[in-house]
Amino acid sequence: MQEIGPKNRWSWVEINLSALRRNVRTFKKLLNPSVRLVCVVKADAYGHGAAACARAMSSAGANQFAVATVDEGIALRKSGITQPIVLLSEPPETAIDDLIEYSLIPTIYTTEFVLAYGERCVAHNTVGKYHMALDTGMTRVGVAASDAVEFRHTIDFHRGISCIGTSTHFATADIEGDWDFRRQYQVFSDAIRELHAAGFYTGLIHCNSTAATILHPELQFDMCRVGIGLYGLHPSEATVSRLELSPVMSVKARVVRAVEPRIGDGVSYGMTYRVSDPHLQIATIPLGYADGLSRSLSNKMDVLVKGQRVHQVGRICMDQCMFAYPLQTLAHPQGFAPIERGDVVTVLGEDGAEYISADELAALRNTINYEVLCDFSLRLERIYL
Ligand SMILES: *Cc1c(COP(=O)(O)O)cnc(C)c1O
């Protein structure tokens, strides 16, 4: 039997680190030479494993990293990353000592937090760096752009803090020529101008995530925060023709059982699929919704086996799912060799000439490729290639 996959389980995620490095270099080339590339490795690098990915990104030219939570930042530091790590949002005050201990730079937007941060920094005999986020229209986080100058007037007296960046985030950067995007950009650039006119140092200015980095090279400012593109996927249709990227994640499993059922036999909970073809096998793989294969894909998705695309059938269970493998079809009356225990099945990625993309799974689930990637981090072991 082939030696492939982890020792204790016949399902796993493969991470292609050369594809990841290639994507990092692709984005580096897209940026003006003086612009810093912030690699976004939140949610365990979109399910790809933050420690290994950050190391590969560093070697390919990442200038710094961004995470969503303090614990993600701590894990990155413990894995040996020494470059700046910025937190994309403001944690609770109870996290401040960890920010200082692990040199994590918060993105701030409340006076309560930033003044508490300043106090702790003075007590630690240090100066707390921060980025200020501006809400320019997405209504998520940030200081309202119209309050930016007043906010800085309120906090700048404090000797324990120092602004090293000012940012915003776009709600519609993935739609070409969008009016709301242009308005957010206008609000952002006006706020920056007002801050400068009032004499405030704004540090590194940044607003672009993957979509805007690809579609709006003129808005790079000092840094771009790139996430999904590094993992080889596009944030929307609009960017696909602009840039060639290499998907980094594959999901695979091996057949644990294959049977030739009788006509009328039911498959899985509820027997939502019944065998109607005498020339097929039902094969089981140890991959289920607790591994991130959403139950909403039941009876909708395909898998690849022996370079062929075949239908998943029956409800996806917590730890397993089944697929139907035709032993004979009209196009192939001579038939196919049966599936055997141990055969490799591709749930995401390529097998021969066939390919199942995260976008395909996302469309079937009514979601976006981002969620598909994150979900596969639930329980599967990762193998780095
Ligand atoms: C997640 C995130 C990014 C990265 O977005 P992508 O679309 O994955 O490039 C950038 N900035 C902020 C504030 C984010 O939350």
Image (cartoon, rainbow, N blue to C red):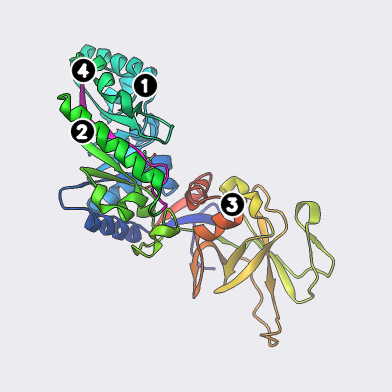
| x and y, in percent, of residue 348 in the image | 52, 60
**Label 4, label 1: how far apart the Cα atoms are:** 22 Å
Q: Amino acid at mark 1?
A: Ala
- Dot 3 and dot 2 residues touching (CB under 8 Å): no
Does residue 81 appear anywhere in the picture? Answer: no
Give the mark nearest the N terminus, 1 or 3: 1
Q: Quadrant of residue 275?
A: bottom right
- Dot 4 and dot 1 residues touching (CB under 8 Å): no
Does residue 154 appear anywhere in the picture? Answer: yes
Mark 4 residue CB less than 8 A from any atom of ligand 1: no
Disc number lying in front (4 or 2): 2
Q: Which residues are magenta?
A: 160-175
| x and y, in percent, of residue 290 in the image | 60, 45
Q: Amino acid at mark 4?
A: Asp
Mark 2 residue CB less than 8 A from any atom of ligand 1: no
In which quadrant of the rendered image does the C terminus lie? bottom left
Q: Is residue 161 magenta?
A: yes
The extreme bottom residue here reads 334
Give the mark nearest the N terminus, 2 or 1: 1
- Which residue matches tag 3? 366
- Which residue matches tag 1? 95
Q: Is residue 277 left or right of residue 334?
A: right
Q: Amino acid at mark 3?
A: Asn
Mark 3 residue CB less than 8 A from any atom of ligand 1: no
Q: Amino acid at mark 2?
A: Arg
Give the mark nearest the N terminus, 3 or 4: 4
